[in-house]
Image (cartoon, grey):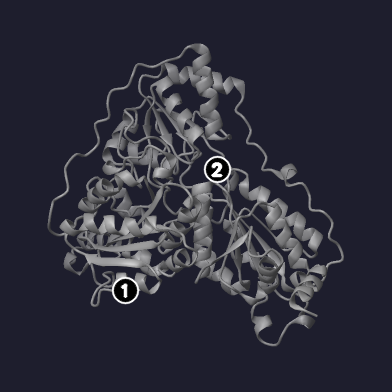
Amino acid sequence: MDQTSRHAAANAVAWGSDRIADLLRSLNTPYLALTPGSSFRGLHDSLINHLGNERPEHILAIHEESAVAIAHGYAKVTGKPLAVALHANLGLMHASMAIFNAWCDRAPMLIFGAVGPMDAALRRPYVDWLHTATDLAALIRPYIKWDNQPASIPAAVEAIIRAQQISRTAPQGPVYICLDQTLQEAETPTRDPLPNMRRFEAPRSPAPDRASITEIAQRLSSAKRPLALIGRVSAKRPAWDRRVAFAEAYGLHVLTDLKVGAKFPTRHPLHAASPGLSPSADALALIRNADLILSLDWIDLGGTLYQAFGKPWPEVTVVQCSLDQYSHNGWSMDHQALPAADISLLTDPDRLTELLLAEAEACGISAAPPAGASWAAARPARSAGEIGIEDLARVVIATLVEDRPSYLRLPIGWPGALCDFDDPLDYIGYDGAGGIGSGPGMSVGSALGLRGTDRLPVAVLGDGDFLMGATAIWSAVHHRIPLLVIVANNRSFFNDELHQERMAKMRGRPVENRGVGIQIDDPAPDLAMIARGQGCVAFGPVSDIADLSDTLRNAVKHVREGRVAFIDAHVRREYGRGIPAQVLRTTDQ
């Protein structure tokens, strides 16, 4: 029998994992990120030899945490779940931090685990016993939306369709399906047609009732100093445009933050203070001065109000619109402090702004044109010398402005006053839970989501973040995903230096010891060499601001040719101006 005949004969047999692979294609799953593992060898074979490594295509990651981070970054750009395969208990434990990031960021994701064989009589000695657990999902159940371990192929089909539906239903999040190895490798007697996937779309979020729309519109139009806190909302351009029209119609000043990505144009006159990971002093002053606060799924509304007013139940009128309560549980405190609200709506915030905008148009509500924004910093970067974080930001922004950059990640110290976002893809956002090491993988996933567009994918990472997840960059090189990585390298887990300085001052101890056990020095790792080892075109270390612009232009040429370029920029141990004190108390990076 020749090779073609053998392939035809092999394909005449239906295997359990073939059915699952067909379903993934039917669900329009473009990619599956994985670190190989024997527990899902049947599914791996089906994706390669049954589907031809197309729809879904394998995205090979060196570490399971990177595989999940890639799926997370892809979801932040596209709004769609990517598939991930994790090997037994080992891969799941490796990936758990990245799954928690995705959970806290409310990112959709379809995670496949594998176990087995569950039938002890079929296990290979030693290794199959080590990689088998009775309830694998118990490792991550507190921070996923749903899980299942189906016992048959028809049950697996239903479970995967349900998982996809649940993952895409707001508030979105990761789901987990565990596949018995025996189930994958068994012959299946049927090739029945798969269901029509259009009949299993995510359910629509409930619309707010008419009385609430009328009441909120009246309160907004009568308020003298209304303020909108814009959090987890759609990154699609039509929703962006409606938010701008809505704010203009009611004369709403707007605050955004750097946790969720670009959600409103930062240079718009109504964007009233620079964005950051936590509210700046100017932002807190605006909150205190407001007579009505509209929260559009703002992350940690209760904590923000407490920072502004110094008490948990401020008297200002608060309208809260969020579906996030549906994801709250007793294990994780990612739901943050309990906020007070005069009106609280369990609905999609984009649906609310759409209806309120229509109400304004129907009732002839219009606000006076806003005055120009005044928070933007104008100080130029120095032309030579040691690189400060603000100098890095100014040179990067000025040099790349014509290349339509999409900033996939920005470090803690990045000065929000320099952020000029005019499109949802201008900035993708943070990682959800502050897990160091997520930046490289998420940047690769976001760049994958941008591949084929005219956007320049740019990730500005911290050195600790890069070092923890450096091998994720190999995946971008291997799969020809264009990406520019800039490391703001201060040779330290610098935020913890500030924590230690704070402790020393509180306890009357020497602040000179703040870097002990924290600084990444003596020797300083050669980051450019590490990046080169992953196949990147690497530059650096760049330690003089005079050299940075030319290095950036050179790097961009390589990215435009479809390569991954890397720049190690040595920066001072500092944060930019306006980084609020709350960051030093609430983050660990």
Nearest to the eye among marks 1 and 2: give it.
1
**Vertical placement of residue 394 versus 318, above or below:** below
**Vertical placement of residue 573 versus 79, above or below:** below
Q: What element carries label 2?
A: helix
Q: Mark 2 points at which residue?
A: 324
Q: Mark 1 points at which residue?
A: 529
Residue found 58% across the figure and 34% down from its top: 347
User: Which residue reaches farthest bottom?
Assistant: 125
Residue found 25% across the figure and 35% down from its top: 375
Residue toward you, 467 or 149: 467
Locate the C terminus and report the quarter of the image it occupies.
Answer: bottom left
**Vertical placement of residue 284 versus 140, above or below:** above
- Are there few (<14), some (14-19), or many (20+) residues within 10 Å of tag 1? some
Residue 119, located in which quarter of the rendered image?
Answer: bottom right
On residue 165, the disc is none
- Are there few (<14), some (14-19), or many (20+) residues within 10 Å of tag 2? some
Residue 243 at what x, y percent from top left? 46, 30
Q: In this view, does 172 lie to the left or right of 198?
A: left
Q: Is residue 198 left or right of residue 221?
A: right
Locate the N terminus and report the quarter of the image it occupies.
Answer: bottom right
| Amino acid residing under circle 1 | Met
Residue found 48% across the figure and 66% down from its top: 475
Residue 211 at what x, y percent from top left? 59, 20
Residue 565, located in which quarter of the rendered image?
Answer: bottom left
Report, in whole angstroms, how far the alpha carbon at label 1 lies from the one at label 2. 43 Å
Q: Is mark 1 on a helix, strand or loop?
A: helix
Residue 56 at what x, y percent from top left? 63, 59
Residue 33 at what x, y percent from top left? 56, 63
User: Which residue reaches farthest front?
Assistant: 2
